[in-house]
Image (cartoon, grey):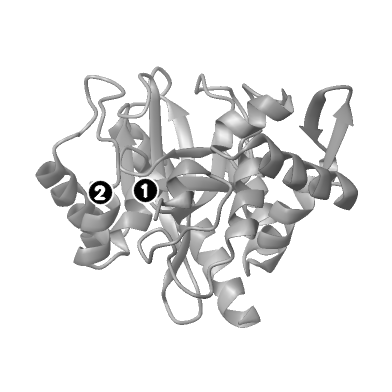
């Protein structure tokens, strides 16, 4: 008997390896794949584009696109499909469910006013950090960062704070899933050296990354904790190496950064 899942990407997987469990809803997973196929490089796609990007058949992609269109998450202009602003409701539902969402922003605004540098908050998702809040000042990074932006955890200060909160098994899993590619000559890409750097972060309770993500960018982060003391997010200050070097940033910004992170953690604990 032929394996229909191999011949037809729109077919239900037939083996246990393709199906993570009996509770796995394949059609829902395909719908999410269609949504994720739209990005900055592909803001509008034809049916053929979506099918190619997701590995679905044209018939399968068409059913999902029409369903999303009926629900208001997708609109069509001739042959081109694109997401609607309603798709933001999905991400906003996550953000509003987070205990520090509406607590951290005013604290971050106060911090930015005090230090005159950009401030962000992020959570860990696999081997990446995802930005959930951002209060920018100077544009010091070439990437256009906003809520929902992702960066590799291993070479970012927020990522190292979040990785430092993992046990050894989960840390190894995250690093094994990371693409340890040097972004600059300073980027640590050796797994052993990374684990040593992360262990140092765990001991001192904060992280600084000096031009490992991008030349000229120095970032310092501290953890945000819940009522049980678990790290749920990281808060950072990003500065330009031409204005302050790493030692100067620590001297000038570490105390206000830690105070801000503690303020948010305290508010989260009271709410919880």
**SS at circle 2:** helix
Q: From this view, report whether residue 102 is shown above or below residue 34.
A: below
Could you tell me which quadrant the N terminus lies in? bottom left
Can residue 158 be seen in the rendering of this structure?
A: yes
Residue 2: horizontal and vertical position, in percent? 41, 51
Please name the residue that numbered disc 2 is placed on.
175
**Which residue lies at the image location 56% right of the left edge and 52% below the top edge?**
11
Residue 80: horizontal and vertical position, in percent? 80, 24
Q: Nearer the viewer, residue 168 or 14?
A: 14
Could you tell me which quadrant the C terminus lies in? bottom right
Please name the residue that numbered disc 1 is placed on.
127
Q: Are marks 1 and 2 in contact (CB under 8 Å)?
A: yes
Can residue 254 be seen in the rendering of this structure?
A: no
Q: Residues within 10 Å of mark 2 (few under 14, many from 20)?
A: some
Residue 222: horizontal and vertical position, in percent? 41, 54
Q: Nearer the viewer, residue 196 or 34?
A: 34
Of mark 1 and mark 2, the one earlier in the sequence is 1
Give the farthest residue toward the left: 192
Per the model, the C-alpha gap separating discs 1 and 2 is: 7 Å
Q: Is residue 253 left or right of residue 74?
A: left
Q: From this view, report whether residue 269 is shown above or below residue 71.
A: below
Q: Is residue 129 left or right of residue 33?
A: left
Say which quarter of the image contains residue 161. Answer: bottom left
Q: Is residue 24 left or right of residue 180?
A: right
Q: Residues within 10 Å of mark 1 (few under 14, many from 20)?
A: many
Q: Nearer the viewer, residue 137 or 163?
A: 163
Residue 257: horizontal and vertical position, in percent? 47, 51
**Which residue lies at the image location 25% right of the left edge and 35% below the top edge?**
180
């Amino acid at each position: 008997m032929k394996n229909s899942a191999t011949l037809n990407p729109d077919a239900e997987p037939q083996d246990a390896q393709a199906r993570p469990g009996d509770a796995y809803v394949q059609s829902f997973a395909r719908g999410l794949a269609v949504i994720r196929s739209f990005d900055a490089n592909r803001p509008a796609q034809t049916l053929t584009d979506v099918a190619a990007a997701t590995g679905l058949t044209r018939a399968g992609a068409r059913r999902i696109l029409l369903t999303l269109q009926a629900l208001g998450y997708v609109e069509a202009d001739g042959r081109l499909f694109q997401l609607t602003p309603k798709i933001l409701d999905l991400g906003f539902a996550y953000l509003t469910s987070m205990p520090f969402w509406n607590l951290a922003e005013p604290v971050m605004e106060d911090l930015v006013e005090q230090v005159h540098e950009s401030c962000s908050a992020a959570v860990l998702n696999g081997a990446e950090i995802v930005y959930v809040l951002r209060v920018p000042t100077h544009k010091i990074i070439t990437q256009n960062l906003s809520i929902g932006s992702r960066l590799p955890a291993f070479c970012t200060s927020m990522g190292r704070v979040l990785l430092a909160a993992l046990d050894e098994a989960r840390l190894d899993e995250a690093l094994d899933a990371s693409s340890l590619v040097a972004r600059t000559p300073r980027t640590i890409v050796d797994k052993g050296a990374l684990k040593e750097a992360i262990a140092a972060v765990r001991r001192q309770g904060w992280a600084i990354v000096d031009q490992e993500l991008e030349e000229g960018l120095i970032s310092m982060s501290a953890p945000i904790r819940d009522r049980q003391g678990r790290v749920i997010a990281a808060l950072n200050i990003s500065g330009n190496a031409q204005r302050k070097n790493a030692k100067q940033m620590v001297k000038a910004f570490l105390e206000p950064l830690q105070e801000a992170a503690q303020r948010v953690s305290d508010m989260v604990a009271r709410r919880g």
